[in-house]
Image (spheres, rainbow, N blue to C red):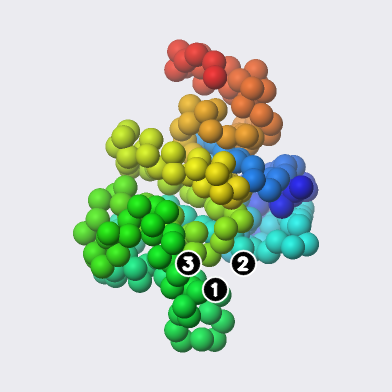
Amino acid sequence: MALLTCQDLSVGYDGKAVLGPLNFSVNAGEYLSIVGENGAGKSTLMKTLLGLQPPVAGKILTDEEFSHREIGYLPQQTAVQKDFPASVREIVLSGCQGRCGFRPFYNAEEIARAVGAMEEMQIDDLASRCYRELSGGQQQRVLLARALCATRKMLLLDEPTSGLDPKVTEEMYTLIERLNKKDGITVIMISHDIRAALRYADRILHIGKRVFYGTPEDYLKSPDGKLFFAVEGGEER
């Protein structure tokens, strides 16, 4: 069942398209990796999927029981965000704001959701720590826990391993895979890591001079997949 379907979708700013038209769908429980060249429009596409900006053309269709409010978002971090002076607990709880409506406080269910998300991300022992004092890997776990407070249906992740060392990067991929495979959360991830996309994703959307959408196996046979392995000297999945 498709949670989200893009039909002839073009995205951009001020009515000018930078990418498209795109045609792809994301089924419940699926893991989609969005890869491609820098500046190709990947982050613009993600902002459009989130409803933060309107499509230039085309449509984004969602399942009738699914809405944009049920998407958890982990954006790329800026230097200012990394230095944010709040506790881990406060940041994770802020993921529940969309559930509060006009209430100026979090209820017991929302607090329990935040505690559960921190435990799942293995950061419950950091709850009282200041966010800006944490390592890059710990900060990403906090932001992932925050996204989990918003939803248990779909996560949109924009370069979640950017700037992390190889060990922490692998740990983050393992956490995301567990959320997808064990908990059944649909994942859409922007990544520059082609090898990880081939290893973890069910579908790949390559954006660039050419657009590819399909399985990792078919991507390996595509011009861009062949080019990647020619450059990297890699082996097939």
Numbered mark located on residue 113 in the image: 3
Determine the residue positioned at 60% across, 41% down.
31
> Which one is earlier in the sequence, the residue at label 1 or at label 2?
2
Number of other residues with Cα within 10 Å of mark 3, as a class: few under 14, some 14 to 19, many 20 or more: many
Determine the residue positioned at 70% across, 61% down.
66
Give the CA distance from mark 3 to mark 2. 16 Å
Q: Are marks 3 and 2 in contact (CB under 8 Å)?
A: no
Give the structural element (helix, strand or loop) at label 2: helix
Q: Position of residue 147 (x, y in %)?
A: 48, 59
Number of other residues with Cα within 10 Å of mark 1, as a class: few under 14, some 14 to 19, many 20 or more: few
* On screen, residue 99 above or below 140: below
Q: Position of residue 5 (x, y in %)?
A: 74, 49
Between 51 and 174, which is closer to the camera in this rendering? 174
Give the structural element (helix, strand or loop) at label 3: helix
Quadrant housing residue 85: bottom left
Q: Which residue is mark 2?
A: 69
Give the structural element (helix, strand or loop) at label 1: helix
* On screen, residue 219 above or below 26: above
Q: Position of residue 188 (x, y in %)?
A: 58, 46
- In the image, what residue type sits under mark 1? Gly
> Which one is earlier in the sequence, the residue at label 3 or at label 2?
2
- In the image, what residue type sits under mark 3? Arg
Q: Which residue is mark 1?
A: 98
Give the CA distance from mark 1 to mark 2. 7 Å
* On screen, residue 106 above or below 29: below
Q: Position of residue 140 (x, y in %)?
A: 37, 52
Q: Are marks 1 and 2 in contact (CB under 8 Å)?
A: yes
